Image (cartoon, grey):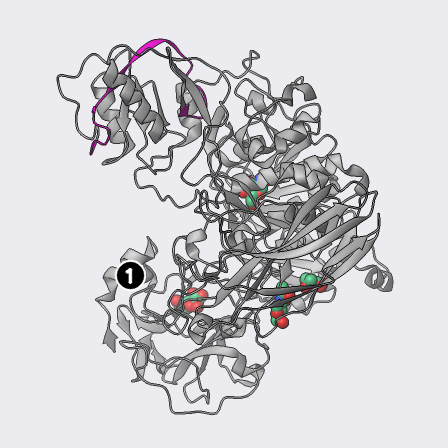
Amino acid sequence: MARFLVALGALCAAAAGASAFAHADGASSTLGAAAQVVPNSFILEVDASAATLAKRGLTPFAALSRTLAAVEHSGYSHTVRERFESIPDVFHGASIQVADGVSIEDLQKIEGVKRVWPIRKYQLPRDPVDSISDYTFQPVASSLVARSKITISASGQVSKKRASTLPPASAYRGSTFYPHVQTNINLLHNAGYLGQGVKIAVFDGGLDYTNPILGGCFGEGCHISFGYDFVGDDYDGDNSPTPSDDPFATCTTHGTHITGIIGALANEYGVVGAAPMATLGHYRVAGCNDFSADDIIVAAMLRALAEDVDVINISLGTPVGFLNNSVTQIVAEYLASRGVHVVASAGNDRTEGLFFSNAPAAGFSSTGVGATDVVNLPAYNALVAGRDPIPYTSPTPFALPGQYTLYFTSTSQTPANDACTALPSSTPDLTNRVVVVRRGGCDFTVKQKNVGAAGGRVVLIANTQGSLTIPQLNVGTSGLTAVASIRYEDGVKLLEYYNASPNGQILTFPSGPLVPNVRETVSGGTIAYYSNFGPTNDLYLYPSLVAPGTDIVSTVPGGLGIMRGTSQSAPLLAGAYALILAARRSENLTPTQLRGIFQNSAKFVPNAVGSSALETVMLQGAGEIDVNRAFAARTLFSPSAIQLNDTANYRQPQILTLENRNPYAVTYTFSASYAQNIVTYNDGASNQIIPSTVPDESNYKVVRTTFSPRELTIPAGATGTVSIRMVAPGFSPADVDRFPLFSGFVNVRGQSVINKRFQTFNVPYFGLGARMVDMPVLDTTDVALGPRLPFIAVGEDILAESAIVIARNDPAVVYFRLAAGTRRLSVDYVSASLDYDSTIPSVTNPTARMSKLAKRATPALYADVPTVGALFRPDYFPPRDNLVRGPFGYSDYELPLNGTFTENGQTTTLPNGESYRVLIRALKITADPTLSSSYESWLSPPFSFSG
Ligand SMILES: *[C@@H]1O[C@H](CO)[C@@H](O)[C@H](O)[C@H]1NC(C)=O
Ligand SMILES: *[C@@H]1O[C@H](CO)[C@@H](O)[C@H](O)[C@H]1NC(C)=O
Ligand SMILES: *[C@@H]1O[C@H](CO)[C@@H](O)[C@H](O)[C@H]1NC(C)=O
Ligand SMILES: *[C@@H]1O[C@H](CO)[C@@H](O)[C@H](O)[C@H]1NC(C)=O
C-alpha cells in the first residue's frame, strides 16, 4: 500500500471543511455535488393521462389513491409527505418515505406509477464568492434595525392584517432608479405600464411584508395579496414541514429583498419595484436555514397553477447539467405548457467554470437569468457648501442633522495603510467632522474602529483607483454613527478642497432620494464576476439572458439593504416579464415567445468597460434585457437562439423562422457578429481534465456565415424563413483538446416598407469545437484531494495492487469525483476475476499510470457485465462535482466499503475471504448508455473482507 500522508495538507486546504478523512471511519458517506437527497424518499408521478384513466375508470384523485394503496400492497409501507393533485390536470402524484433499501426500480414496477424521482434538497443561493478581501458584508437587516434609520412612512406600526392604500400609477412616473434606467424599465413606468393585472408568485424563504414599502400587511386587499408557507421556520429539507397560511419570516433577508425588486411601492428613497402594480404573492418554500426540497417546490408550483399565477420566480437551485432531468425541471415544463412563465436565477458559481447549469433555471421553456454589474451605483448626496455634491454609496441616506467639517487621516493622495493603526494623539476633536479614510492595507472594520476610538462619528471610505466601490458598509461595533464609501475620484476632489482650506469645507447630509448617474467605472455594465457559465451538457443555451444583479437596493426586514447575485437579477426579469405581459396582453404570449422577445431584443454585453469586444454567449446568454425594445419588438424568431451543437452533432443549415406581427410588411436583412471564444480547459483535456476556473478568453475564431436569402420581405402578419449556414472555425488539435466554445449573434435589421422605420434584433448562436462524447467524466487528477483519483483508502493508506483484507468495522472508502456531468453512474462490487478492460488503471497512485490490468475482454453491453451488488447507482443524472465552492463546500464521492449493501429491499453481506473489486462506470456525455464502450471506468485493486 502506498501511504499518502503528504497529501493530507493539500486535502485539508482543498476540502474546505469537508475533509475526506473525516469520513474514513465509514460512519457516513458523501455523494457528490447534487446528491443531497432526502433519504428513503421519492416522488411518484401516477399515470393520469385521459386514456389510462378512462381504461381504469378512475378520476386522477382515485388513481393516486389506488396507486398509493398498491405501493403499500406491494410490501412497501410508507408515509406520504406531500400529495400532488393538480387542477388543471398536469401532475398527479405524491412524495413518500419508505423503509431502507427500497429503490426507484422497485417503485417503478407498481401498477399506475408513471415515473419516480429521488427528492433532492435545495439551498437558497449563497452570497457570491467575494473577490474583495477586505469587504466586510454584515447582515443588512440587523444593521439597519440597529441604526433604525428607516421610518418609511408616517403610518408607524402597521398591523399585519390591515389593508393599505397603495400609491397610484403617477407615483412611478419620472423614476431614475438605477437598475430600471439600465434596462429601460423606467420608460414603461413613465407610460403607465406597471404590471397591472399580472399575477407574480415569488418562491423564497418568506418575507417581511410589514415593511411599509411592501404595503405593511398580507392578504386580500394588501400589496402582498396571496401566498402560503409550505415549510415553517424549522424545516431543513429532511424533517417534516409545518405549513401555515402566513409566509411571514424575518429570519432570512433573501425573500424580502427579492420581493422588493419586483414590488417595492413608490417611496421617498426612490427605490421602486419593476412591476409594482402587479398582483404579488409569496410562497415560502425554505425554512430559516435556507433549505428546501423537490417535493415542496413541486407542491408550490402546482399551487401557483391552481391560483392562476402568470409568472413564478424561483430562487433556489441545484446543479444539474442536463435539461429535463430533475422533477422541478419537468414540472416547470408542464407549467410552461399551461402558460406559466418560470424565471429562475442562473447561479453564483462562475468560479466553477463552464458547463455549470442549475435546475430549474435550465429548461426548454423556463428562463435562467445571469447577472450584470450596475452601470450606476446606489448613492445619496453629501452637500459640500459652494461645491458640487459628493455622492456616497449607501442603502439609505444618512439623514444626519447639523454641519460637518472635513478631516483626512492622511493628506497624501496615495497613503499606504491609511487608519490601519490607532490615530495619533495629535488628532483633533472629530465629533463634528467627516473623517475620510482611504481604502487598502487592512479591513474596513479596523479603519472604522480606529476612527471611532479617536472620537469620530461619520466616516467616508474613499476607494483607491480602479477598485470596486463598496456600496454598503456597516458601523458594526466601531462606535460610529454612519459610514459609507465614495468613489476614488470624489476622494481626490475632497482632498484637494481640504488641502486648500482644512477647516473651510462645510458638509451636510440631508435626506432625499437616490441620486442618478453615479457611474460605476470599474465593471459597470459587464457580466458580474459571480454569474454562472453555461452551456448545459446537452449544449442548450444557458443562461437565457442577463439583467442587473450587483449592488441592488431593495427591501429587507425592517428597512432597505443592498444585496447582489443572480437572485437579484432574476426577480428584475420576472417583473419585466409582467410589464410586457400586461402591455401586450392581447397577444397571449407563451413562455417561449416571451423569452424569445426578450432574448432577441436584448443588448450586447461587452467583455470590459468601454470594450467593443462582446462577452461570450456562455456568460451573457442572449444579452442584457432592454424592456423598451422588448415592448416594441413585433418580430418573433423561432428558434430564439441558434444552438449549433458539437462537431459530432453539428446542425446546419439552421432554419430561422420570422413572424412579422407589425401591421405592415417588413424587409429583413441579415449579418453576423462575433463574441469572445472561451475554452473549457486552459491546458487541454489531456493534461488537466477539471474545467478551468478562469477560462481562457483570448482565443478568437470566426464563424463564416451565409444567409439564404440575404434579404427577406414578409407581409404584415405573415411568417418567412431564412436558411443560415455557419461554417465552424477550424481548430487545431491542441485547441480542440481545450474544448473551445465559439459564439456570437446573428444581427437582423427589419425595415418597414412604408415609412423606412427600422428595428434591430439579435439571435445568439454558439457551438462547441470538439465532441461532448470526448469530455472527460471521471476525475483522474490529484487536483482535488492530493492523491490521484479514483482510489480506495483504509485510513490514510491507498490500496495498491496486492490484495488486502478489509475489516468490516474499519471499512475502506472509495474516493472519486465527476469532472463532468453524466447520464449514468454506477459503482458496483464485482468479482475480482471479472473480465473488464477499464479505461483508468487500477492503481492510480503514486503516479497516474502505475499499472493497467492485463488486457481483458469486456462484455459489449453494459447490462451484460456481471456484478455482485450495487454500492451506488443514483437515479438521476449526477452533475459535475464542485471544485471551488459548492453549496456544501467542495464535493466528491466517498463510499464506505464494508461488504454490506441493500438492493431490492434486501440487505446482503458479502462473505469473508472471497475476493472482490469495485467497478465504477460513468457514461460519456452523448454516448449510448447500452454499450460498455460508452463508459469511462475504473476497476479497483482486489480486496476481501474479514470480521
Ligand atoms: C422531457 O421529459 C418528459 C418526461 O420524461 C418527456 O415526456 C418529454 O418529452 C421530455 N421533453 C423533451 C423535450 O425531451
Ligand atoms: C427569482 O429567481 C431567482 C433565481 O432562482 C431567485 O434567486 C430569486 O430569489 C427569485 N425571485 C423571486 C421573485 O422569486
Ligand atoms: C446536441 O446533440 C446531442 C446528441 O445528439 C443531443 O442529445 C442534444 O440534445 C443536442 N443539443 C441541442 C441543443 O440540440
Ligand atoms: C455499510 O455501508 C453501508 C453503506 O454502503 C451502510 O448503509 C451500512 O450501515 C454499513 N454497515 C456497517 C455495519 O457499517
Spot occupied by residue 176 in the image (x, y as percentages of width and height): 56, 25
Queried whether the magenta region covers residue 722, the answer comes back as no
Queried whether the magenta region covers residue 413, the answer comes back as yes
Q: Nearer the viewer, residue 235 or 941?
A: 941
Query: What residue is drawn where x is 37% and y is 68%?
Result: 683
- Residue 618, placed above or below residue 292: below
Spot occupied by residue 614 in the image (x, y as percentages of width and height): 51, 51
Q: Nearer the viewer, residue 778 or 218?
A: 778
Q: Which residue is label 1 attached to?
A: 11
Query: What residue is drawn where x is 33% and y is 30%?
Result: 488
Spot occupied by residue 609 in the image (x, y as percentages of width and height): 45, 43
Q: Quadrant of ligand 2?
A: top right
Residue 437 visible in the snapshot: yes
Relative horizontal placement of residue 750, taking residue 930 as reference (left or right): right
- Residue 712, placed above or below residue 274: below
User: Mark 1 falls on what kind of element?
Assistant: helix
Tell me where the magenta segment starts and ends, as one range: 392-417
